Amino acid sequence: MFEALETGKFLDKDSYDEREQVLRDQLLQYQFELAQQQVPVIVVMAGVDGAGKGSVVHQLNTWMDPRGIETNALWMHSDEEESRPHYWRYWRALPRRGEIGIFLGSWYSRLLRVALEDKPDRARQAHRLTQINDFERLLTADGYLIVKFWLHVTRETQRLQLSEEAPIQQQNPRVGADAKAWWKAYPAVLKYAQKALLETDTGNAPWHLVEAEDRRYRDIAVGELLLDAMATRSERRDSPPSPPVPTNISRGQPTVLDTVDTQARLGKKEYREQLADYQNRLQDLAWKAHRQQRSFVAVFEGWDAAGKGSAIRRVTGAIDPRLYHLVQYAAPTDEERDHHYLWRFWRNLQRNGRATLFDRSWYGRVLVERVEGFASHEQWQRAYNEINQFEEQLVEHDIVLCKFWLHISPEEQLARFKEREATPHKQYKITEEDWRNREKWRDYELAVEDMVAHTSTADAPWTLVAGNDKYYARIQILSTLCERLEAALD
Amino acid sequence: MFEALETGKFLDKDSYDEREQVLRDQLLQYQFELAQQQVPVIVVMAGVDGAGKGSVVHQLNTWMDPRGIETNALWMHSDEEESRPHYWRYWRALPRRGEIGIFLGSWYSRLLRVALEDKPDRARQAHRLTQINDFERLLTADGYLIVKFWLHVTRETQRLQLSEEAPIQQQNPRVGADAKAWWKAYPAVLKYAQKALLETDTGNAPWHLVEAEDRRYRDIAVGELLLDAMATRSERRDSPPSPPVPTNISRGQPTVLDTVDTQARLGKKEYREQLADYQNRLQDLAWKAHRQQRSFVAVFEGWDAAGKGSAIRRVTGAIDPRLYHLVQYAAPTDEERDHHYLWRFWRNLQRNGRATLFDRSWYGRVLVERVEGFASHEQWQRAYNEINQFEEQLVEHDIVLCKFWLHISPEEQLARFKEREATPHKQYKITEEDWRNREKWRDYELAVEDMVAHTSTADAPWTLVAGNDKYYARIQILSTLCERLEAALD
């Protein structure tokens, strides 16, 4: 999930100044409104060491009225704390109604600290995660607004920060003494953090993942996300609700989709050879999976005209029809609408030893339903957690789960749309709706970025497919399927 | 928690007939209303084997319109189910919006089945509990109404049922073949059930614990509780909300308080001897706990004039003042009101090696706040779970937790009230409010019964103190404290 954050987001000084001006006015305004409404706010600032958590918190205190904010550092452990149940320290630091409590070091710290241990106790970690969810649920049920940030930097940036070799304008003041230990533990920290973030990314207390390489971007992003959460909450009390404050966090910023090399190409001859090779392998693997009674599930999502259909045909073309089931999803039927949105995917899940291919999937909840407003903010926000829990059940049942996003550039899409309009037997493929969706390219881009960041797990990773060249895309999909299956089967 | 259900509730035929008449009309009415409102309803029928789960479900189908009800037995396992992730079977059986799905055998079955195993895997059990909570939360967030019943019978009744020696009018038709295995595993089933019920007793999907010794009482109780849940949900949509349908489930039935022997007495001489003895022991134990840096927490709840104050004085009289802190709770202060209701208890928790004595406690949430309507139905329902989680944290911190309910009969209370009014130096102790509370005796009795059933755990049991005789009560409290401490200290 963290790789999705490494896209090189940054802000130049002019943009920063301009946005800061607007942001601080609005933050003050909503701080005041939530105080009036007696809403207590909890801000959790977490992230890898050296990402500048302290600096961001300092900035928030500068932007808002510090009289209504209490910052809890919790990095000095007192024996008063140690001699009581662990959560006592958090309970005593909870903000009053109408105030803001910022937690630098929080109920997540202990969880990540195990990265420094030799043999962490898995059952204990699981229990602590349950306690965190219980604690946050208890607070949100009581009216607390909880906003959680995870600041991410690469290991190299962390090294520069910790060694104080970073350019002066990126340096963050530090308090911890064990910088080297944390740097050594970087991969372990990310591993534990991923698990913790996935399991505590609930609709009530969602995580906001922020790339923290650039100080200016980092501070503005945190500020605008906090503003958005406060504004949404503030307006929940009024009726009728007005649309949330439009946030500009990602205006002009690269997303995870910009990491896809859309120029990747494959020659026709190479394609034919590789296609035959991978299709043969996949055919054998599907039978092998069947003999071992293992299933696999492949999810296909992507832009309109990205070539999902033709790519899926190359997959189905390789597998014995008795061994797979292809399901296509458009608008739900009446019966489906009468159930939970996940029901229509559960019902089509094939039995052991068979493959289920999903042409569009449960990710519609956080893509089209989010962008078109069919799902409320609360609904799609909650869906990341629901989807991760669903996929965890598939993985626990030993199902191999592959998820593909077929990516093309907007220019390529335009060319394909025009070709479709011009070609008689392809005209049925292009509708008014496709053109309308195209206008929301940026919204979808942001939704895809969030989706990848929140649902790309070790067992169920997203594969971003470079789709401008159809040959290249098909081979990428087939090879991924083969490799995942080969790794999973005995 | 289950002992609290063994009070001998029953209904004679005339009462049954009279109440059934009203009940079935209302059940039909709310079944129709929820169908109109497109609310899907899930009824989970769980309980020990032989408690008559099938018979109750049959009865519900008779009372309501079976066309809107689907009963899922799930006791025949198909290979279609086995070859998919475990929850697939439940997803496919979920009711449509506006319909009712009754689950006989549910996501709890697998959890209890481990009682038949030799060495259950604790981490796996914990994970399954988390999955259950996730599943139910996902459904309730989507608008499902979930009503869960646990039917309890004693082991002896179970034996009679399973051997078909029970009086014919109590016999329940049975489907399972492994009756003997279940009877042998009765204590293990209750152990696992207690853990499962406590951890899944959430505000959204609460458990209803029903004594199932008497068929008539059992059926009417389940029917009336279901009706109450449906009516509450139905009215949530209207505004302004009307008060829930008054349910008569416990009218005239004995509660757990009736199991307290209010006639228990202790002579003055015996009292003096035992008092000196236990106070000495407690004094030593408090120092020993201090040396071992162990804490203990004692909670005192009870009827007005039950003698809490004088009992607490016998406890504090035995402990070095440096080793204990006594906190009395009345209405919350402004600052306390500005926090979560548990905050004012967390803040007074003493450090390791000291005792904290709570004169009234967090149980106010499910007693006075429930009865007086200071907490909403949803709030006090949710509080059982929150309280259990809070106490779990105390126990995990090796705190010895004792909870006392001082019980007196209403006649004894009346006598004490009158004595207070007649005695000049005691008049300050009796107020208008005490007389008002007295009128709600029955409401409090039911609240106490629910409280004991939902929060009496192995590590934090309730002690119901026979308080009509003050001597007896004080010795019961002191001896319980001594025994719990002796068992816990090295």
Image (tube, coloured by chain):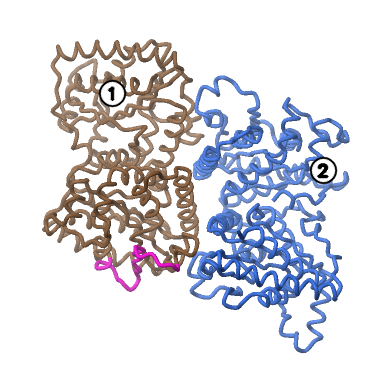
Chain colours: A brown, B blue
x then y, percent, for residue B22: 77, 46
Task: Give the residue type at disc 1.
Answer: Thr
- The residue located at (61%, 63%) in the rendering is B365
- The residue located at (42%, 14%) in the rendering is A323
- The residue located at (53%, 29%) in the rendering is B86
Q: Is residue A61 left or right of residue B483?
A: left
Nearer the observer, A154 or A424 = A154
Crowdedness near tag 2: few (<14), some (14–19) or many (≥20) residues, C-alpha within 10 Å? some
Chain for numbered disc 1:
A
Magenta stretch, residue numbers: A61-80
Image quarter of residue B79:
top right
Foreground label between 2 and 1: 1
x then y, percent, for residue A4: 25, 40
Image mark for residue A480: 1
Task: Give the residue type at disc 2.
Answer: Asp
Q: Is residue B393 left or right of residue A233?
A: right
Q: Quadrant of the C terminus of chain A?
A: top left
Q: Is residue B82 above or below residue A245?
A: above
Q: Is residue A11 above or below residue B159?
A: below
Q: Under tag 1, what secondary structure?
A: helix
| Residue furthest bottom in the image | B424
Specify whether residue A207 is in view.
yes
Crowdedness near tag 1: few (<14), some (14–19) or many (≥20) residues, C-alpha within 10 Å? some
Q: Under tag 2, what secondary structure?
A: loop
Instruction: Tell me how far mark 2 sits from mark 1, CA to CA.
Output: 62 Å
x then y, percent, for residue B460: 64, 57
x then y, percent, for residue A364: 36, 34
Residue that badge 2 annotates: B214
